[in-house]
Amino acid sequence: MKNQGNQEKLKRISLDEIEKKRDEIIETGKTIYRNPETGYKEFNTSAMVEELFKSHGVPFRKKLAITGIIGEMDTGKPGPTVAILSELDALINAKHPDADSRTGAAHACGHFAQVSWITGALIGLKPVLGQLSGRILLMAIPAEEFIEIDYRGKLRNEGKIRFYGGKQEFIRLGLFDDVDIAIMNHAHSDSPARSIQIPHCSNGFVGKSIRFIGRASHAGAAPHLGINAINMFHVALSAINAQRETFRDSDSIRVHMIVTKGGESVNVIPDEVDVEMYVRGKSLEAIRNAGEKVDNALKAGALGMGGKVEIKNIPGYLPLKPDESLHRLWEDNASQLLGESMIFHRESIGASTDMGDVSHLIPAIEPSSGGFTGGLHSKDFTVTDEEMAYIVPAKLYAMTVIDLLSGNAETAKKVIAGHKPIFDREEYIQRMNSLFYQTGWP
């Protein structure tokens, strides 16, 4: 009971400090929003976070996985290390009203607000740091959006990265080796604005880079001499759609794609079609089974039209396996700020996150919060409630860290003791490396 009373006192101090600096916290998010950059290109965004750490006297390491940066707050007392995570990248949505006119990058997923949240957590925890035990890491991590696959493949070939996701690279580089607990919040826009969602799992996925190879010929004079790569893709897509009835609802399979090259001239039978694709599912086994069916369908398209197909498989993200004891802490704090009626539990979400990879190694959660409207990744995504979008999650970070690291960090120690990791780092790397493979027809 004594520690509980002390926790509440520390939380009041922390929340008061966040309130005093709310303008700085909000402006941080707005500045990031106005400068969207896609994964492994977030050089300006990373520089902004660096200036943030400098201005608050927080030691940091930078240029981690190209653009990542980690600030460290040390209590001076031994104890566990809790990491608060944010994501640096935007995505491509050229139709978004605030998209970069040169690159098409837009912050249509809320990552800009995450930098506000770690700013607020820093501000709120600084005056109570001496009353906690252990360390707090403020991680700003690149490349959560799994896009621009060709560009990331180039970085991989150059030896600059091995995995396409930023948290995957942080794991590979050992940057989570000394982290005991990881917490990250995300934006949502599909329930009441002043609400918190608690997902109990999410989809993982595998990425595919596909090239159909046909034979060019004059589309009007001699189409019979060509092999149409678009038609190969069309046959393959029909075969994939025919497989959908075999996907179990409980596996939450999603197969979706974009065509990045579909020919060069309408007067030439296209001899090359390039496709990027995800195969998502709730478990590794479900993803593997669906992925094999998709590969067979792709091969069928090439075989049926007499052409070729090259399929490069790329490890995507693992399903999220959140730690329920951390969920309870987050939910209790959210209830204090918003009321129990504004907490919504979701059994599963169809989207994917590289926080899933982290959750296979250490206790981790990725709840989400409102304050936004418009669908995630859509041209309509925007902030509607600045208090929810920028301030409330920062308070939740500070409150949850105080729960974990106050009182000689006994709560954090219980969380760690009760967690059973699925992989250690070497097992994780081995598993992910095995997902890089190529197949095709013939």
Image: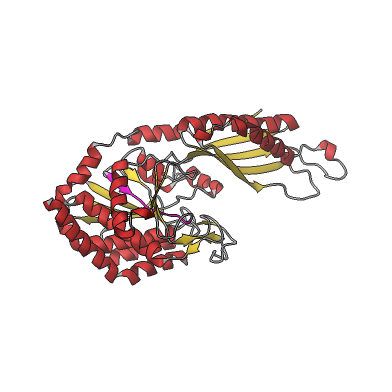
Magenta run includes residue 241? no
Q: Closer to the camera, 331 or 403?
A: 331
Residue 343 lies left or right of residue 405; in this view the side is right
Q: Closer to the camera, 384 or 69?
A: 384
Q: Where's the C terminus, which quadrant?
A: top right
Name the residue rendered at 17%, 45% in the picture.
Answer: 410
Decide: is 228 above or below 261: above
Q: Closer to the camera, 285 or 269?
A: 285
Rendering colour mode: secondary structure
x, y (%) of residue 360? 36, 37
Quarter residue 128 falls in? bottom left
Can I make out residue 345 in this image?
A: yes
Name the residue rendered at 39%, 58% in the picture.
Answer: 114
Residue 378 lies left or right of residue 338; in this view the side is right
Can I make out residue 306 in this image?
A: no
Magenta span: 181-189
Q: How many marks?
A: 0
